[in-house]
Amino acid sequence: MSTSRKQTLGVCYYPEHWPEERWAIDAGMMVEAGITHIRIGEFAWSRIEPEPGHYDWGWLDRAIETLAAHDLGVVLGTPTATPPKWLVDSMPDMLAVGADGKTRGFGSRRHYCFSHEGYRRACARIVTDLAKRYGRHPALVAWQTDNEYGCHDTVESYSKAALDGFRDWLAQKYQSPDALNRAWGNVFWSMEYRSFDEVELPNLTVTEANPAHAMDFQRYSSDQVVAFNRLQTEIIRAHSPEVPIAHNFMGRFVAFDHYAVSRDLDIATWDSYPIGFLDRDTDDEENKRRYLGVGDPDNQAFHHDLYRACGQIRNGEAEGRWWVMEQQPGPVNWAPWNPAPFPGAVRLWAWEAFAAGAEVLSYFRWRQPSFAQEQMHEALLLPNGEPNEAYEACGRISRELDRIGAVAQPERAEIALVFDYESAWAWKIQPQGRDFDYLDLVMRFYRALRQGGVSVDIVPPQPQAVSGRKLVLLPGLFAGSDALVDALAASGAAILLGPRTGSKTADFSIADGLPPGPFRRLFDMKVRRVESLPPFVDVPLQGGGRFDGWREFLVTGADVETRRVSADSHAAHVAKGRVHYLGGRPDAETARVIVGELLREAGLEPRELHRDIRIRDNGDMRYVFNYGPETVDVLNLVDTGSVLFGETQLAPRGVLAIRKT
Ligand code: GAL
C-alpha cells in the first residue's frame, strides 16, 4: 500500500523583493488563501553573499522566521542558477559558451557552464553553508536544487571546460581511440583520431558533425547536469538528512536525462505554464483558438505522468512523489503572445494536477514585481499588493482539497507508454525529415490514450517498467536492449512498435540486420526503406486514416499479418499475435483508431469521450474536466459514484469530482 498524503497549495515567494514590513502581511494572506508551502531563495545569491565570503544571513533568517511563525512550510532553493557578478568576474571562464562559439554573458540568469570545476566548487561552498544553517530548521519542508536545469538552452556548453571534460569522458567510455573510431565509424570522411586529445566538440563543423559524436556529446552534457545536481544533493543530505530534495523540471524539455537526475531526488517537480506552452503544443489554428486561455487538454497531463515516473525512480512506484513547483496564475511574459486564462482555468489546472497525484501545487509567483525582466508576469497579487484573480481561486481550491482528504499516488496503470531521453536526442540530431520530433510522436499516442479515457503510466525503457502490463507502446524508441525485448516477450502484453523503433544501435549506426534491430526477435519483419514527407503531402491508408511526415516500407515473414495497407499498396501496419509494428507517423484520428484497436485487443475498453472532456481515475476518485467552451453533459461518466463537487452539466473549464462507490 502506498502512503496517503493530504494535497496542498504552495507559492513561490521572493522576500528580498519586498520591504521587510510587508512580510508578515504576505504570510497572513498566504494562510488565509489556504497556502501552506512557500518556496524561497532560489535566485538570492547576491543578497546571501553580497561580497565574496561575507554572508548576510540576517534577512533570510528573519524571512524564514516570519513564515514559520505563520506555520508555513519553507521550500528552500539553492541559489546556483544565478551566480553573482563578483563570482563571474573572479573566473570568467565559468560562463557557458553557445554552439556559435560565443560566450554567454552576465545580466540575466543560468550563465554558467555545468562542466566548470571552479563553479562547481563555488556551488559546493554556498550549498554547504546554506544546508548547515537551515538544514535542520523545523519549518523546512523541502529543498530545491538550483532552478530549471537547462532553461534558456543551457545544458550544452561549448567551453574549454566542456572540451576537457568531454575528452576525459570519452577516454573512460572507449578506453582507446581505436575503439572510439570504430564505434563512431570515423573511417568515413577521414575523421579518425589518434588520441582523445584530438577530439573537438561537435559545434562549428563545416557541415553536420558525425551523429555518433553529437550523441556522445549530448550524453556527456546530460551527465554533467546529473553530476552537478548530485554534488548538491550529497551536501544537502549530509547536513539536512530529514528533508526531502526536489528539483523543478520544465515542460517540453528533453535536453538531459530527467530519469538520471531523478535518481538523486526525493521529489520530482515541474513548472506548468499551460497557456504559455499552447503555441508549442499544436499547429492546429482551430485548437489554438479553442484552448487559447486554458491550454492544450493533454499537455499538462502528459507532464504530470512523466514527472510522476521521475518521482518514482528513487522511492519506488508506490511511494513516488511529485509536485507542480510553479503553476501559471495569469498571463506570463515569455510566450509569443500572452493571453489571460479563461474563467475557471486556474482551478481546472489545479485539479488536473491533484487528480494525477501532485502533493503540492505551487503558484509562480506570490506578487507581480513592478521591476526587471518579469514585470509583465502576473502573480497571485497585483504589483500593488492587492489580490489578483488567482489568489481568489486559491481559497476555493483549498476548501475543495479539504473535502477530498488524503490521497495516495495513482495505482500502477495497465498501460505503459515508453518515453526515452536518448531517443529525443537521436531524432533531434538526425530528424531525417524537418518536422520529425520524438516528443511530438509520443504525444500523439498519449493523446489518443487519454482521449480513450484510460490511465497510462509513462515509463523509461526498462524491463521492470514494462513487465506486468496489458499494453505497452514504444513509438520511436531509438535503440532497444535485449533485456527490454525479453521483458516484452515475457509480458504477454499487446505491444506497439514503430515508427523508427529499434532502428539504431546505441552507437548510432543502423541496427544490425535492419530495423527494428533487436525487436526483430519478436516477429519476422524488417524495415527496408524510410521516407520523410513535407507537410503538403501525406500517405492515405486503405480503409481510412493516414500517415503524415514519415513512412516506412516493411518486409514481413509468412506468419506476419498485414493489418493496414497504404493507398499505394504498401504494408503500413503489421502484426503477429499481439505484437504490432506501425510503419508511419499516424495523424491524430488514425492514432485514435489504432490505439482503440490495441486497447480492445489488450482487453481494455476505450471510452468515446467528447473532444473537450478528459477524465482521470485515482484510487476511489474520478475527476472529469471540461477544457472546451461549451457545457457538456457528463452524467454517463459518474458511473456508480457520488459527486463530491462540480456539476454533471459540466460548464466550460468545469471540474467534477466523483467518489466511486
Ligand atoms: C520559470 C522559472 C521562473 C520564472 C517563470 C516565469 O521558467 O523557473 O523563475 O522565470 O518561468 O514564467
Image: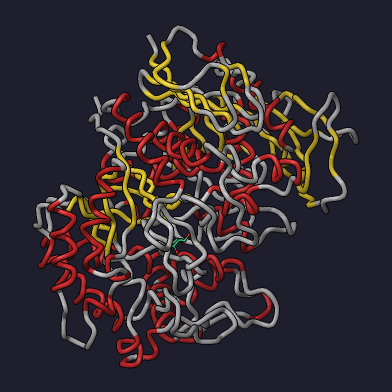
Q: Is residue 467 left or right of residue 591?
A: left
For image coordinates 46% across by 55% down, the residue present is 250
For image coordinates 57% across by 77% down, the residue present is 202
For the residue pair 325 and 376, the one nearer the viewer reads as 376
Asked where in the image residue 469 lies, by quadrant, the reply is top left
For the residue pair 471 and 647, the one nearer the viewer reads as 647
The x, y position of residue 27, in whole percent, is 24, 53
Asked where in the image residue 284 lies, by quadrant, the reply is top right
Q: Is residue 61 left or right of residue 222?
A: left
Q: Is residue 71 left or right of residue 383?
A: left
For the residue pair 198 and 573, the one nearer the viewer reads as 573
For image coordinates 43% across by 73% down, the residue present is 170
The x, y position of residue 330, in whole percent, is 51, 51
For the residue pair 625 and 521, the one nearer the viewer reads as 625
Q: Answer above or below: position of 227 versus 503.
A: below
Q: Quadrant of ligand 1?
A: bottom left
Q: Answer above or below: position of 162 versus 346.
A: below
